[in-house]
Image (cartoon, helix red, strand yellow):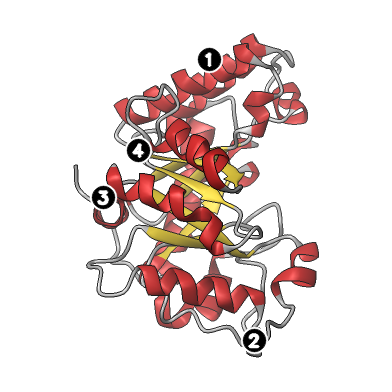
Amino acid sequence: MEEFGVRLRRAMDIRGPLCVGIDPHANLLSRWGLPDNPEGLATFCKATVAALGDMAAVIKPQSAFFERYGSAGIAVLEATIRRCREAGALVLLDVKRGDVGPTAQAYAQTYLNPASPLYCDAITVNPYLGIGALDSIFDEADAHRGGVFVLALTSNPEGTEIQHARTADGRTVGQYVLDEVGRRNADEQPMGSVGVVVGATIGADTGHDLTRVNGPILAPGLGAQGAKADDLRKIFGDVMRLVLPAYSREILSHGPSAPGLRGAAMGALLACRKALEYPDL
């Protein structure tokens, strides 16, 4: 299997820069006319993947919305991952794991080892036990050509309290994360397989340098959180080709109609293609 960075670059070039989150919270299930139980969850996910799996470069299930149903929800997550793969979409599981030693290794084996029923192309991780604590996750990803997205400058306003704090050498914590990821991606082509999460809501003048990341930049916060596609150019101007914009509620709110979902996804995709200077379809 090719490296995740290679596979993601190809998917974005062919399908366009769009990641669709699957966030089946109770209010959204209700809006779709579905019960808040594993059966409603399964119907929601099956319909979403059927409508969008062949057009999004990446589909990003949020693990928490499956875990809350226990083993029945995890079974739906396994089926959803499988359907995404069958539709040709890469799967980024939003789990935000982060721990030390054997625990981190167990998380890595759960999500990044092809022998696991929860095997995905990539996962999100939390670096706030230290970047070094993630080594076993990076190692597992390397062994199986997977991807890892490290939280750096997130889209929630509370994140600045930690991410903009200064380290001993004067860099912000967020910049330290960006630099460490860039070090791991050095010389990788067309881009590395270790990415970062940088919210599309952070604004254009934070003083952070993204130019050395050399890996995919997942940009949440579009749509319901207030960011617009045009903001991508302002924030990521020098690294636009690395950016993977992520939408969830902005698209999912147009279901359960398949044409509604596809129309909303296409609108988001066209706006992102224009903002990030991709060729016209």
Q: Nearer the viewer, residue 43 or 78?
A: 78
Q: Earlier in the sequence, mark 2 or mark 1?
A: 1
Q: CA distance from mark 2 to mark 4?
A: 33 Å
Q: CA distance from mark 4 to mark 1?
A: 19 Å
Q: CA distance from mark 2 to mark 3?
A: 31 Å
Residue topped by disc 3? 7
- Seen in the image, is 265 located left or right of residue 172? left
- Residue contact at pointers 1 and 3, CB within 8 angstroms: no
Amino acid marked by disc 4: Ala
Residue topped by disc 1? 75
Numbered circle sitting on residue 209: none
Residue depicted at x 29% and y 45%: 143
Q: Earlier in the sequence, mark 4 or mark 3?
A: 3
Horizontal and vertical percent position of residue 200:
60, 66
The mark closer to the camera, 2 or 3, is 3
Q: Earlier in the sequence, mark 2 or mark 3?
A: 3
The mark closer to the camera, 4 or 3, is 3
Q: Nearer the viewer, residue 22 or 4?
A: 4
Q: Earlier in the sequence, mark 1 or mark 3?
A: 3
Residue depicted at x 69% and y 17%: 69
Up/down of 259 relative to 75, above or below = below
Number of disc labels: 4
Up/down of 246 relative to 33, above or below = below
Residue topped by disc 2? 205
The mark closer to the camera, 2 or 1, is 1
Q: Nearer the viewer, residue 243 or 114?
A: 114
Amino acid marked by disc 2: Asp
Residue topped by disc 4? 89
Q: Nearer the viewer, residue 172 or 275?
A: 172
Element class at badge 2: loop
